[in-house]
Image: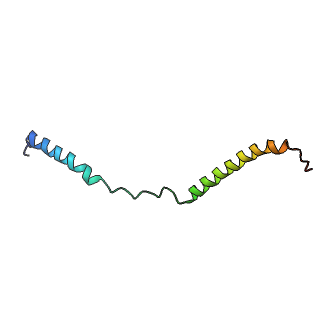
Amino acid sequence: MARIPSALAAALVLVLAAVAPAVVAAPAPAPAPSSDGTSVDQGIAYLLMIVALVLTYLIHPLDAASSYKLF
């Protein structure tokens, strides 16, 4: 059995180490869509709900202090 010189073996290892990652790497999958529109609609709905609650709690004390007797 013939012996491989150590310099040739080291060069072969370096070449394989440089080529191996390129052979194993696969193309990246396409990114998923970040939003389908429903999450934007839901966010706007939550924002409007918060605005409605804030307005309700701001207007209620003024309505309760009025001199009108509804009931």
Q: Nearer the viewer, residue 16 or 71?
A: 71
Q: Nearer the viewer, residue 65 or 19?
A: 65
Q: Is residue 34 above or below residue 62?
A: below
Q: Nearer the viewer, residue 13 or 34?
A: 34
Q: Is residue 38 above or below residue 19?
A: below
Q: Is residue 8 left or right of residue 63?
A: left
The residue positioned 14% from the left and 46% from the top of the image is: 12
Q: Residue furthest front?
A: 67
Q: Is residue 61 left or right of residue 50?
A: right
Classify residue 62 by image quadrant. Answer: top right
Residue 44, image x and y in percent?
61, 54
Q: Is residue 26 left or right of residue 55?
A: left
Instruction: Name the colouring of the figure.
Output: rainbow
Q: Is residue 70 left or right of residue 17?
A: right
Residue 30, image x and y in percent?
40, 59
Classify residue 38 by image quadrant. Answer: bottom right
Residue 67, image x and y in percent?
89, 44
Residue 18, image x and y in percent?
20, 47
All told, the count of numbered labels is 0
The residue positioned 30% from the left and 53% from the top of the image is: 25
Q: Is residue 31 above or below residue 14?
A: below
The residue positioned 71% from the left and 50% from the top of the image is: 52
